[in-house]
Image (spheres, grey):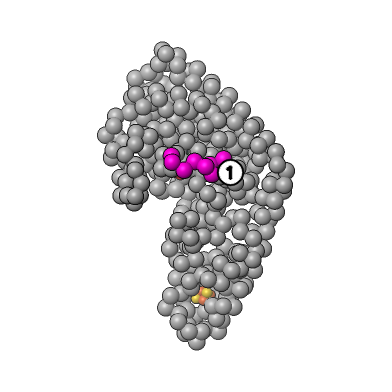
Amino acid sequence: MAKMRILSGMRPTGPLHLGNYHGALANWAAMQDTYDGFFFVADWHALTTDYETTGAIQDNIREMVLDWLAGGLDPARSTLFVQSHVKEHAELFLLLSMITPVPWLERNPTYKDQIVQLENKDLSTFGFLGYPVLQAADIIIYKANGVPVGIDQVPHVELTREIVRRFNFIYGNVFPEPQALLTETSKILGLDRRKMSKSYQNAIYMSDDPETVRGKVSQMVTDPRRMRKKDPGDPDVCNVFTFHRLYSDEALVTRVNAECRTAAIGCVECKKLMAENLVTGMAPLLEKRRKYAENKSAVEDIIREGDARARAAAMATMEEVRAAVRI
Ligand code: TRP
Ligand code: SF4
């Protein structure tokens, strides 16, 4: 039996942090054996909000693929590629744009959200409104069955299904309807207990070295109600404890859980223990990243091979699409 195909993408907007790793990348990596994975850098999508500042985009693409490789994506098992290297996405986007009603796009919740949140940006562009149509093209050009995404992207996959139904109704059955494979949102928060995000400057990056990690952990906000060392704390509301759960062994998790509640352990010591386990846990990722980064052409070769595999699949679909549309 052929494996089910999954596809997902990320916009190259900067280095990946541990929230991205636990929220998305680690899931992708875990799915590689079960599924035929297509993972791509959505560089055209990065232009929808940042079309004026494209200077860093090539570096960001390379860094993102390095983060992916460090995080366990395996080019021998999965297809890693760059969206803009497969021009067929743009052709399918154009054809889909002909059949997509504008109200479907205007009622898209992420569209409405972003217009409000990024009020200092000019988002009244055709490309920004059409973002989910390009995303639909990304997905269906590979006839992907599953799309591993976070909850925020589910409306886009729903819209993709609606576009597929409309296309198949008008031109005949070409595309399967893809399904969102919901990945659980990462429970880890940023250093300040807000959502971990590059724009909040509260992130620990996958590529941070041990000294940086130790420094950042020492600044982490703990249980906000624990003011003094002699006050008991509540690990259930403490982000440091969430990290312990991910990176420390069971014995230490149990100990911290108990000693925090009785004030037998202080936050400074607790963080130091966690930081060392985090550094140890991140070491294999850093080592992998270093190996790939050392060899200047390694990443380029991986992208070139992935592009070729993706292009072959996209070209085959477009043959069918052109025949169906008669154009
Ligand atoms: N919109 C996605 C995001 O911002 C990125 C993306 C583009 C994507 N094309 C996709 C995700 C296709 C899944 C499938 O995170
Ligand atoms: Fe958090 Fe550890 Fe401090 Fe408890 S002792 S509040 S778990 S940092």
Segment tinted magenta in the rendering: 51-58
Q: Is residue 87 above or below residue 71?
A: above
Can residue 241 be seen here?
Answer: no
Report helix, strand or loop for mark 1: helix
Left/right placement of residue 234 relative to residue 297 reads left
Q: Is 69 placed above or below 99 here?
A: below
Residue extending farthest to the left is 103
User: Is residue 52 highlighted in magenta?
Assistant: yes
Residue drawn where x is 67% and y is 55% of the image: 286
Q: Is residue 245 left or right of residue 120?
A: right
Picture residue at 41% right of the left edge, 21% below the top = 173
Reply above or below: 90 against 116. above
Looking at the figure, which quarter contains the C terminus?
top left
On-image quarter of the N terminus: top right
| Residue 280 on the magenta span | no
Q: Residue furthest bottom?
A: 230
Q: Nearer the viewer, residue 94 or 4?
A: 94
Q: Which residue is mark 1?
A: 59
